[in-house]
Image: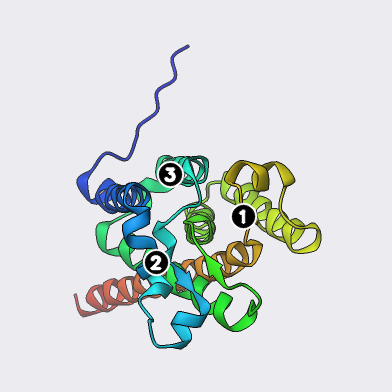
């Protein structure tokens, strides 16, 4: 018996994840030169350095932190890359990044600094699981339930001590929560948009048939 995995290799499916990966690697390589100007820093955001709400996500505490997030980025692409287009994924990523940072800013006021893609990736995960469900893939339900169980566990008990030791920093579990909420909102909007488009197409087809 042979098994084949068809990766989403169309340019529009991988170009934006590739750009994100490249930017994260560059941010890591030039961390000393760039981080002070670009990472999420509450005090400096309060002083109108609003770009940090977005740019801070590309930085990481150490190589293990970077490797974990880039591995997750690739895994999500293999799982849900068939749903990606350059425009859709870019909008999803930017929306999740800003929503995560704004959520941290207003509701996690004790958190002074934050770096990493994990919050955004939780949003991408939830969005992909919802589209799986929309396309009648039963694994979508498992993924959707699983990620919310993980987030609930983190909110109650905190992050794994092993992960904390690996990345040499506290895990901002609230970032995972706000990223997932952003992915939920974006996913539901995507589903509603497709449903409305399908309904309009059906109505148009029916009207055309009536005219004949």
Secondary structure under tag 3 reads: helix
CB-based contact (under 8 Å), mark 1 and mark 2? no
Reading the image, the residue beneath label 1 is: 144
Reading the image, the residue beneath label 3 is: 70
Circle nearer the viewer, 1 or 2? 2
Secondary structure under tag 1 reads: helix
User: Mark 2, residues whose alpha carbon is within 10 Å: few (<14), some, or many (≥20)?
Assistant: few
Instruction: Using residue 207 as the reference point, say whether residue 151 is left or right of it.
Output: right
Q: Please name the residue shown 55% across and 80% down the image.
A: 105
The quarter in which the C terminus is drawn is bottom left
Residue 90 position within the rendered picture, expressed as x and y whole percent measured from the top left? 31, 63
Camera-side residue of 123 and 189: 123
- Of mark 3 and mark 2, the one earlier in the sequence is 2
Residue 158 position within the rendered picture, expressed as x and y whole percent measured from the top left? 75, 57
Camera-side residue of 105 and 98: 105
Circle nearer the viewer, 1 or 3? 3
Residue that sits furthest to the top in the current view: 1
Secondary structure under tag 2 reads: helix
Residue 24 position within the rendered picture, expressed as x and y whole percent measured from the top left? 36, 51
Q: Please name the residue shown 51% across and 42% down the image.
A: 68
User: Mark 3, residues whose alpha carbon is within 10 Å: few (<14), some, or many (≥20)?
Assistant: many
- Of mark 1 and mark 3, the one earlier in the sequence is 3
- Of mark 1 and mark 2, the one earlier in the sequence is 2
Residue 205 position within the rendered picture, expressed as x and y whole percent measured from the top left? 27, 71
Q: Tell me if residue 157 comes above or below residue 10 in the rendering.
A: below
Camera-side residue of 188 and 51: 51
Instruction: Using residue 212 as the reference point, say whether residue 147 is left or right of it.
Output: right
CB-based contact (under 8 Å), mark 3 and mark 2? no
Using the numbered discs, state the Cα–Cα distance from disc 1 to disc 3 in whole angstroms: 21 Å
Res 193 label? none
Would you say residue 138 is visible in this rendering? no
Reading the image, the residue beneath label 2 is: 36
């Amino acid at each position: 018996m042979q098994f084949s995995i068809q990766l989403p290799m169309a340019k529009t499916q991988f170009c934006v994840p590739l750009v994100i990966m490249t930017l994260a690697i560059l941010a890591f390589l030039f961390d000393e030169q760039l981080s002070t100007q670009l990472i999420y820093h509450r005090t400096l955001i309060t002083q109108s350095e609003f770009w940090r709400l977005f740019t801070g996500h590309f930085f990481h505490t150490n190589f293990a932190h970077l490797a974990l997030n880039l591995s997750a980025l690739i895994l999500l692409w293999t799982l849900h890359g068939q749903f990606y287009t350059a425009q859709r994924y870019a909008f999803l990523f930017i929306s999740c990044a800003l929503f995560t940072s704004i959520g941290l800013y207003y509701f996690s006021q004790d958190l002074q600094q934050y770096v990493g893609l994990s919050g955004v990736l939780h949003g991408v995960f939830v969005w992909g699981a919802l589209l799986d469900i929309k396309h009648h893939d039963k694994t979508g339900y498992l993924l959707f339930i699983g990620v919310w169980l993980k987030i609930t566990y983190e909110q109650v008990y905190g992050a794994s001590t092993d992960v904390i030791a690996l990345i040499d920093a506290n895990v901002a579990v609230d970032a995972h929560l706000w990223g997932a909420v952003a992915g939920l909102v974006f996913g539901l909007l995507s589903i509603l948009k497709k449903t409305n488009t399908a309904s309009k197409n059906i109505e148009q087809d029916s009207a055309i048939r009536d005219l004949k």
